[in-house]
Image (spheres, rainbow, N blue to C red):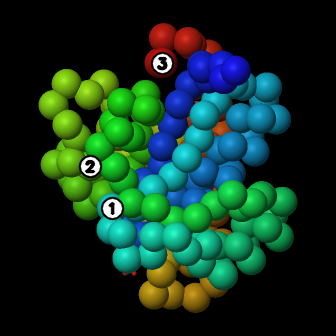
Amino acid sequence: MTTKSDYSVLFVCLGNICRSPLAEAVFHSKARQAGLSVSVDSAGIINYHAGKRPDPRTLEVGQSNGYSFENSYARQVEATDFTRFDHIFAMDKNNLEALKALQPKGSHAQLQLFLPLIQDCHKTEVPDPYYGGVQGFRQILQLIEQASDALVELIKRTSSVK
Ligand code: 4NP
């Protein structure tokens, strides 16, 4: 028997090998620690990396900070995501625009950028770290941890965000 989680969230970036699998792993860990009932997944706008494990730099930085990527394999966003998930968080504005274009009419998922959940955050986008070094992955981990903490607090404060 499956029980419906109280809160379902999908994280989306371009390739689903760097930012969104990291967000999935971090938020999953923090939600679990907070005792929240959540369903979490991630996906990419493009299918180029479909079936692949997260980028080695995502794994290095994420795992060394205690996050798990056990069942993480890249996949492309699909139409059913807009009904399966209540909330879809985009890593950047391009991802958000692409999601808006893909969203089937009448589907209920709420689309928004992830970083504005952080109070007084000067950044609105998680920078794409793909073409840089491992330091970029450490920087995005910090942003993703802050936004994940904010999302956990938001869910704890109110069930009306469902
Ligand atoms: P992500 O990073 O969107 O955070 O997974 C990227 C991964 C792959 C590519 C671009 C960004 N790419 O061009 O293949």
Q: CA distance from mark 3 to mark 2?
A: 19 Å
Q: Is residue 121 visible?
A: no
Q: CA distance from mark 2 to mark 1?
A: 8 Å
- Disc 3 + disc 2, Cβ < 8 Å: no
Q: Which residue is mark 2?
A: 99
Instruction: State yes or no: Cβ of the residue under disc 1 lies below 8 Å from any atom of ligand 1.
Output: yes
Point out the quarter of the image occupied by ligand 1.
bottom left
Question: Three-letter amino acid code at disc 1?
Answer: Ile
- Disc 2 + disc 1, Cβ < 8 Å: yes
In this picture, is 104 found above or below 78?
above
Q: Which residue is situated farthest in the front direction here?
A: 1
**Secondary structure of the residue carrying numbered label 3:** loop
Which residue does the image show at 48% across and 18% down from the upper left? 162
Q: Which residue is mark 3?
A: 162
Quadrant housing residue 73:
bottom right
**Secondary structure of the residue carrying numbered label 2:** helix
Question: Three-letter amino acid code at disc 3?
Answer: Lys
**Secondary structure of the residue carrying numbered label 1:** loop
User: Residue 80: percent from the left, percent from the top?
Assistant: 35, 39
Q: Which residue is mark 1?
A: 45
User: Residue 120: percent from the left, percent from the top?
Assistant: 48, 42
User: Residue 137: percent from the left, percent from the top?
Assistant: 61, 74
